[in-house]
Image (spheres, rainbow, N blue to C red):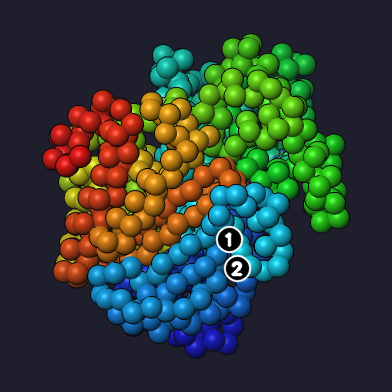
Amino acid sequence: DFVQTYAAHPVYIPPRGPRLHAKNWPAEAALRMFLNNLSNDVAEKPEELVVYGGIGQAARTPQDARKIVELLLTLEEDESLLIQSGKPVGKIRSHAEAPRVLIANSNLVPRWSTWEHFNQLRERGLMMYGQMTAGSWIYIGTQGILQGTYETFAACGRRHYNGDLRHKLVVSGGLGGMGGAQPLAATMAGATFLGVDIDPERIKKRVETGYLDHISYDYHHAMRLVLAARHKGEAVSIGLVGNIGDVLEKLLEDEIIPDILTDQTSAHDPINGYVPHGLTLEEALALRQSDPQEYKARSLQSMARHVGYMLEMQRRGSCTFDYGNNLREYAQQGGEANAFQIPGFVPEYIRPLFCEGKGPFRWVALSGDPEDIKVTDEALKQLFPENTHMIGWLNEASLKVSFQGLPSRICWLGMGEREKAGLLFNQLVREGKVKAPLVIGRDHLDCGSVASPYRETEGMKDGSDAVSDWPLLNLMANASGGATWISFHHGGGVGMGFSQHAGMVIVADGSERADRCLRRVLHNDPALGIFRHADAGYETAQQNAVKHGLTI
Ligand code: NAD
């Protein structure tokens, strides 16, 4: 029995199966997803409550984690639990169609929203970093970013290489929680991939979970594998242990120019994320503790050097883009004045999708049974037979993605599609076609939920990049609509001071209440994306508003 086992030995393993442990499915769903985020199969450093993205946590302390579990187990249908930066702080009176959990993570008044101030508060135990889906309990492991990365590489291939990435080399840094999706995304798109990470444990995890083919500890050995695969046109991925800046320097010396170049080191956090060059991992970890200011200075300088090499590769023909980790900003602070000559991936490849209300829709089988995901995959293919792109993706994903933690699926869906999919999933639960309820959510990286001038809202047509009224409206819309839990975060993938964003998760438990909530939330949430882009002057968003009967 979960409750007794957990009381005796509080480890982070979500209960599975059709039995309820909390008092209702919305609370049970939050409980399972919270524990799933922290489980060994999913979190990058469960012992530190770190889920992914540098220091992105799901709870502030182990005591807070225990208290969250206790409160979710007893949460009534007319109560909502409040979470402040990973700590449960109270319950309020609400009602059955209101969110069961209301989460605010890492928010600071703008004047104080710096890493320095945040880190002081964090050291005093007053805050934690929520990243995007870590503190909002809807991280699904590396799969969560897989399709977005695949679509980005494929779009790059269509634009620059006639849609054919065979014999093409993709190079990137960082094979952590999210960056670890790059090797599989690149090989799914047909390319040869070289990823560099300073931490061998991270690379091993990617091999173990089927995201990466080979690990190498030696530059020359890695390059023999990479060049042979590129020559033969083989979609193979190699993870090399090393510092990405140092490896780019060697590649330039050897005149090996990648066809596509990006980066997913945790550059958004110059102290607790990025590892400066000239230090081993152990030395870096020690310096982080002993002299954070010195560490930061070295980090900024290393990022400038790293981006300097990326710019040189770009000059020599690499299709180079920033992949949403704020590397350009910190490189600029470190002295690389031309850092922003590298374009961001959202304006380059993703914004047209946002104008359709499209984004990273995802769902999780609370039963823990992979068969349930198969059932949802098949049901979606029947629901949208005309969407051959989606069907192709689901077929590929079912073959190549191994699940981490509770079985789950990512699939980008747009306005109209999300609502239909949600109602269909609720029907599958009601009719017993799946063995337990399904949880539906998304990344905060979505069409209408983020203000992030160096990422999701970079280069908006009307210059409204930094306006964060939009994610707040998104949050309020999802509270009003009756999402099961909602969240508002600061910092996320680009760091303190650089973004504000909202998350939503909703459970399909087969009930009529769920039908009503799904119909509202999965309509409103993508509609916010269309409103946001239509308002900024994007014509396709304005046309999509008309197509979907939205009132602007
Ligand atoms: P993570 O912290 O789990 O992994 C980062 C990895 O980078 C670690 O394995 C670390 O060892 C490695 N690393 C750090 N400095 C290095 C260096 N100089 N050379 C080589 N390796 C180095 O983070 P993650 O979840 O993989 O996210 C990566 C970055 O991408 C973060 O900045 C995150 O905020 C951002 N992000 C982007 C998106 C997106 O959609 N593009 C989504 C989520 C996160």
Residue in front for this viewpoint, 519 or 51: 519
Residue in front for this viewpoint, 457 or 363: 457
Q: Quadrant of the C terminus?
A: top left
Q: Would you say the residues marked 2 and 1 are in contact, meaning their CB atoms lie under 8 Å apart?
A: yes
Asked if the residue at label 2 sits under 8 Å from ligand 1, the reply is: no
Residue drawn at point x = 55 percent, y = 67 percent: 86
Amino acid type at image mark 1: Gln
Residue drawn at point x = 46 percent, y = 27 percent: 459
Disc 2 designates what residue?
A: 60
Percent across and percent down for residue 22 are 37, 81
Q: CA distance from mark 2 to mark 1?
A: 7 Å
Q: Is residue 509 visible to the viewer in this orientation of the structure?
A: yes
Asked whether, in this view, residue 368 is left or right of residue 248, the answer is: left
Disc 1 designates what residue?
A: 57
Ligand 1's quadrant is top right
Percent across and percent down for residue 520 are 21, 57
Residue in front for this viewpoint, 291 or 462: 462
Looking at the image, is 222 positioned above or below residue 132? above
Percent across and percent down for residue 349 are 42, 27
Looking at the rendered structure, the secondary structure element under dot 1 is: strand
Asked whether, in this view, residue 313 is left or right of residue 429, the answer is: right
